[in-house]
Image (cartoon, rainbow, N blue to C red):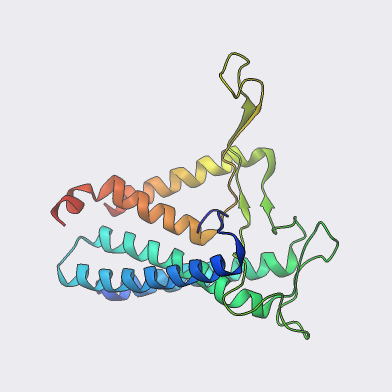
Amino acid sequence: MRIQVKVALLIFLILLADQIIKIIVKTHMHLGGKAILFLGNGSSFISLKIMGWLLALNLAAS
Amino acid sequence: MAFGFEFGGKLGKVLLTAFRIVAVTGLIFFIRIMIKKGAPTGFVLALALITAGAAGNIIDSMFYGLIFSESNYMDGSGVASLFPEGGGYGTFMHGRVVDWAYFPIIRGQWPEWFPWKGGQNFLFFRPVFNLADSAITVGVGWVLLFQRKFLRTL
């Protein structure tokens, strides 16, 4: 795949996912003044998982 | 600009949105130049992540004031509706960025002996953010951690 296509696809997918989540949060979630999705006390584990996943992604790409 | 940090006032909001637009335009040109120069794929994709993140927040600032009604859990107005009959809560370029993710990783208390902060509650990570903020952060981190060798050649 050409690099230009990869760049365009990456930007498009992130924008799409970002906007879909924001619209759902804004119109359906009763979670606080700023529409906060609070993952509570179990969030440490989720955060670590996300950070690990991102690190793996970065290592794979470099 | 990200993670819920804001400038004050209406003019500040317009200036911030204008700055974001200029930054994204510049980034797109920079990506084109880097591709022509044969920059590593990782570097170009990291720039794409930063661009996507910035563009995601620009869309909120530009249009969300027009397409969403006011929503506030605290005052009982509830969730927002999309394309409300009476128009949105703001005008063009006066939308608010929607932050939704909150991951406090460490909660605790500063020890009493600690200067200034002693006895106060401690919370890491406090900012509320969104996917666009994450994309910017990952893109910047990716460049700083894994593309330093290429950065030195610029």
Residue A50, position as x, y percentages in the image: 50, 47
**Image vertical order of residue B79 relative to residue B4, above or below:** below
Quadrant of the image occupied by residue B11: bottom right
- The residue at 81%/65% (across/down) is B78
- Which corner quadrant holds the C terminus of chain B? bottom left
Residue B90, position as x, y percentages in the image: 67, 76
Which of the two residues, B55 or A54, is positioned nearer the viewer here? B55
Quadrant of the image occupied by residue B92: bottom right
Which of the two residues, A34 or B39, is positioned nearer the viewer here? A34
Residue B93, position as x, y percentages in the image: 56, 75
- The residue at 75%/82% (across/down) is B84
Quadrant of the image occupied by residue B106: top right
Q: Residue furthest top?
A: B113
The answer to whether residue B11 is left or right of residue A23 is left
The answer to whether residue B141 is left or right of residue B92 is left
Residue B48, position as x, y percentages in the image: 35, 66
- The residue at 66%/47% (across/down) is A39
Mark count: 0
**Image vertical order of residue B123 relative to residue B28, above or below:** above
